[in-house]
Amino acid sequence: MSLDKTNFLETIEKEGVKFVNLIYVDLFGRTRSMLVPSNKLKGHLENGSGTGFDGSSGGLGLVIERSDAFLKADISTFTIFPWEEEKTAGVICNIYGHDGKPLQSYPRFILKRTIDNMRKELGGDIEAMFGPEMEWYYLKKIDGELLIVDEGGYMSPPSSDKGYEPKKEMASVLEQMGIMPDKIHHEVPHSKGEINFEPLSALKAADTIVFYKRAVKAIAEKRGLVVTFMPKPYAERVGTGMHTHINLMNAKTGENLFSDINSKYGLSQYALYFIGGLLAHAKALAAVATPTVNSYKRLVPVPRFEAPVYLSWGMYNRSALIRIPASSPKKVRFEYRPVDAACNPYLAFACIIEAGIDGIKKKIVPPDPIEESVYHMSVEERRKRGIDRLPASLGEALDEMEKDALIQRVMGDQTFEKYLVIKRNEWLEYCTLVTDWERKEYLDV
């Protein structure tokens, strides 16, 4: 049902909803929310300016002297949270500034602008489809320490997968929320799960990630577990990515614009140019798609960790940055592998789309696909074949981002500068830390 303000309130009353979470994701990917009793919601909706809050404390980069911001519910995102004891729902909000205008630094607006730009460039019926692979560690707190809870491996059976029952409950809850589970399984390392959902248009996919993470964490907590999407929670174990499947489609005709059964790779020229654009901007994109200090602990070129480090693409090749999975012509897509779930999905998806559009506009032809494992090539062989790599740290990624005019245009000058300043401070703070490993190695120099 398409909701307007009237039937939205009627639905809340009919469903017996007691509380509604007004939700947004800040510039740096953290979900924030304000709880409103349902009997007060009508007043929030009828207030023309929206629900006020302190934007300077809300992770939006607003200065304290102009920090008034307002949440306005996008009622099309209304979702009931089935796990709550008192019936509770959530709705994702748009954010407006003190002047009543859309807050241009808000990532959800940045993604909406990008989608509008894509349709101007490529056609009004074009949708960018995103299918993120959602994976996470499930842990248990024992004597104050978070520990793994099973010895299972890739696609382990229930006997060795202690997340088997929790994953079933999570999948059931997600389906009740309108998030349709696609694949459910144990991932490669101990105590790691994955529940994917069906591909969605970019904005819907980003909204879904917000609700998905909340649901999975809540169900885990009910069962005495802790779910983390941290990119690299353990040094000796495989990291946690959010491999993202992408294609363009014509929403009116259902045509997959990335498919061409007569081409060498089954990929259309649009798809190849899009890949070319992504590879051209991949270093700068890293600061948005893999945006934390910890993200780069995952992106280390060790073969057993399958980290997508090298700037290459390939058919089926999991050592490449961009992989073309085996599929039917109707489902042709590529998988952009470096993304992790610490990112702001609105910001990451916006930058990915714009990088691809840049490739299409400029007709950037990617190099030939790499079909060997890049991990096992020598440094000299990679150099001869022109295979570069992603930045090795958040600091390097921010340097690359600062040089990239496209990322600056997508984010807007002010947001771009705020992001750089705050993330550089995060990187410098990390650089001043001294670890036990360093003391052990260097105390006696």
Image (cartoon, rainbow, N blue to C red):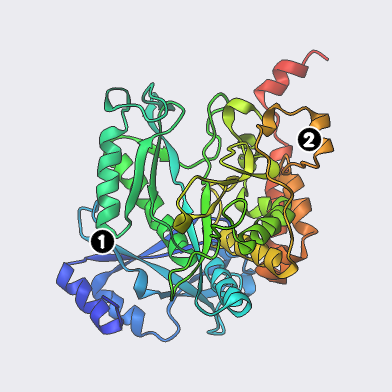
> Can residue 27 be spotted in the picture?
no
User: Badge 1: how crowded within 10 Å, few (<14), some, or many (20+)?
Assistant: many
Q: Quadrant of residue 191?
A: top left
Foreground residue among 272 and 301? 272
Q: Which residue is mark 2?
A: 382
Query: Secondary structure under badge 2?
Result: helix
Q: Quadrant of the C terminus?
A: top right
User: At which x and y percent is residue 382?
Assistant: 78, 35
- Left or right of 339 on screen, residue 404: right
Badge 1 vs badge 2, beta-carbon distance below 8 Å:
no
Above/below status of 48 relative to 35 = below
Residue type pointed to by label 1: Thr
User: At which x and y percent is residue 323?
Assistant: 58, 45
Above/below status of 47 relative to 435 = below
Query: Secondary structure under badge 1?
Result: strand
User: At which x and y percent is residue 409?
Assistant: 71, 70
Foreground residue among 87 and 340? 340
> Can residue 291 be spotted in the picture?
yes
Foreground residue among 401 and 322? 322
Q: Which residue is mark 1?
A: 88
Residue type pointed to by label 2: Arg
- Mark 1 or mark 2, whichever is nearer to me: 2
Q: Residue furthest top?
A: 444
- Left or right of 309 on screen, residue 140: left
Give the distance between the C-alpha atoms of the residues marked 1 and 2, in whole angstroms: 54 Å
